[in-house]
Image (tube, helix red, strand yellow):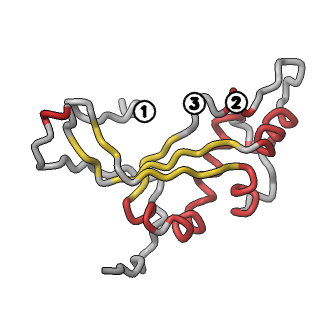
Amino acid sequence: MVLDPPTHSRCVCLLPKPVVRSTRDQSHLGITAMLNRGLLVIRYKQPFIDWVNEADPYPKGSTITQEDANEDSPAYLIHEEAAEYFEDWLQECFSPLFENILGEWYTDPALWPQDRTLKLFKAWCEFELHSMVLDYVDGPLLDDDFD
C-alpha cells in the first residue's frame, strides 16, 4: 500500500512530543521500547568545516578537521512521517535545523552565512536516516534542559 504524504505541515522538527512505549514484550532483548521516531544524523562536509575555521572569531587557535567535527555528529529524533518523506520535510524544516547546527558552533548569528538556503545546507551537510529507533534504557526519557 502506498501512502500519500500528509497534507498538514510536517515541520514540527523542534517541538517536543510524548514518548509512546511499545507494548510488545522484548525484555529478552533488553529493549524497553521501539520509539515511533526516525533518527536523523547530520555529518559535516568539508565546506562546512571551511566555514567553521574561517568564521572563527579567535583564529589563533587550532583549526577543526572534518574528522574532529564528525566525531560526535548531531542526531535528531524526527517524526516517522518526516523520515518517510524526508525531502519534503527538509524543504519545510531546514531553516531551524540549519540555524540550530550553526548555533552549536557559533552563538553569534552575525558569524553565520547570511544566505542560508536549502542548497547551502545540502552542500555543507550530509544526512543519514534511520527508521528504527530502539530505547534500551529502562527508565523515562528526560529533557536535560527541563528544570
Earlier along the polypeptide chain: callout 1 or callout 3? 3
Residue 6 placement, left or right of 138: right
Q: Which of pointers 1 and 3 indicates the residue nearer the eye?
A: 3
Quarter in which the C terminus is drawn: top left
Q: Residues within 10 Å of mark 2 (few under 14, many from 20)?
A: few
Q: Earlier in the sequence, mark 3 or mark 2?
A: 2
Could you tell me which residue is drawn at 19 percent across and 37 percent down?
32
Q: How many marks are shown on the rendered structure?
A: 3
Q: Secondary structure at mark 3?
A: loop
Q: Which residue is mark 2?
A: 67
Task: Residue at 50%, 41% (x, y): give it.
Answer: 75
Alpha-carbon neighbours of circle 1 within 10 Å: few (<14), some, or many (≥20)? few
Q: Residue at x 29, y 36 (%)?
A: 141
Look at mark 3 in the image and give the residue it sits on.
72
Left or right: residue 74 versus residue 121 is left
Choose between 142 and 3: the one closer to the eye. 3
Circle 3: residue type: Asp
SS for callout 2:
helix
Indicate whether 87 appears above or below 139.
below
Q: CA distance from mark 2 to mark 1?
A: 28 Å
Q: Are marks 1 and 3 in contact (CB under 8 Å)?
A: no
**C-alpha gap between disc 3 and disc 2:** 9 Å
Q: Is the residue 71 above or below the residue 108 in the image?
A: above
Q: Quadrant of the N terminus?
A: bottom left
Is label 2 or label 1 in front? 2
Residue under label 1: 145
Sequence order check: which comes first, mark 2 or mark 1?
2
User: In the rendered view, would you say 2 is above or below 56?
Assistant: below
Q: Position of residue 83 (x, y in %)?
A: 45, 60
Left or right? Give the position of 38 relative to 51. Answer: left
Local packing at callout 3 (Cα closer than 10 Å; few below 14, some 14-19, many 20+) is: few
Q: Which of these two is toward me, 9 or 66? A: 66
